[in-house]
Amino acid sequence: MTPRHQILIVEDEMVISMELAQTLKRLGYGIAGQVTRGEDAIQKTGMVRPDLVLMDIMLQGEMDGIEAADRIHDLYDIPVVFLTAHSDEATLQRAIAVQPSGYLIKPFRDRELYSTIELSLHKHDLRRRLMPHLSQPLESGVPEDSPCLFLTPDWMISGGNTKACELLGMSADSFIRTRLDSIISLNPTPQQVTMPDGIFLKKGDGTRIPVLLRLGTITGADGTLSGYVVALTGRDTPA
């Protein structure tokens, strides 16, 4: 059976790298390659275009895993999960700043590895499918009269304003801490492919309405990404 996803391993301890490769194969993943340096990780990613990169933070060479992940993100938009034995606050903050898809502290269990990879792949796929449908960027702040959802950097719903609750027909408690795709669907049936933009909002009563989305970023005082805001514009035709 052909593996569904190819993983690039970036780990400078060969014994750990080989054990990790065996574990990934056992979990059903393919190995896109194994490298030991950050510079090689960037080059290999460009050559083989893996579905995900598992990146040790402390690497041989002049470039550590955090720098390499930042470059991979900019050049190829491929999700990176950090692997590290270092859980100190300074390292964690540096890692967060480059927006990794996941973060695992060594040693970790197979189940933790699997769930982190699957969640990272899901988040990346959701963002990839959603971004082309956005009608326009949200550049001037949150419109007071627009239904808005607030998301974490992982694209989980962290809140919604009163207008969003009214449009959805449910309370915020019903959708907070759920995935964005629990209430947003992309072309869920063949008949809906022809609808404008192909994005549908799942209301509390089970109906779907076509919507347009505008996306804005929420940043902290230090300029790092802390989340997103999505402004919704509903249409009149229910699905």
Image: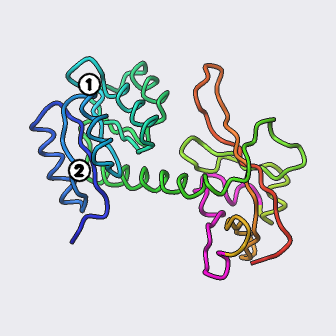
* Disc 2: CA contacts within 10 A as few (<14), some (14-19) or many (>=20): many
Q: Is residue 32 left or right of residue 49?
A: left
The amino acid type, in three-letter code, at marker 1 is Met
Tell me if residue 172 is in the magenta stretch.
yes
Instruction: Write down the residue under mark 2.
Output: 32
Q: Quadrant of residue 80?
A: top left
The amino acid type, in three-letter code, at marker 2 is Ala
Q: Quadrant of residue 150?
A: top right
The residue at the far bottom in this view is 191
Instruction: Write down the residue under mark 1.
Output: 58
* SS label for mark 1: loop
For residue 224, the mark is none
- Mark 2 or 1, nearer chain start: 2
The residue at the far front in this view is 47
In x, y percent, where is residue 200?
A: 70, 67
104 or 69, nearer to the observer: 69
Q: Tell me what residue is drawn at x 67 percent, y 58 percent.
A: 175
What residue range appears in magenta?
171-193
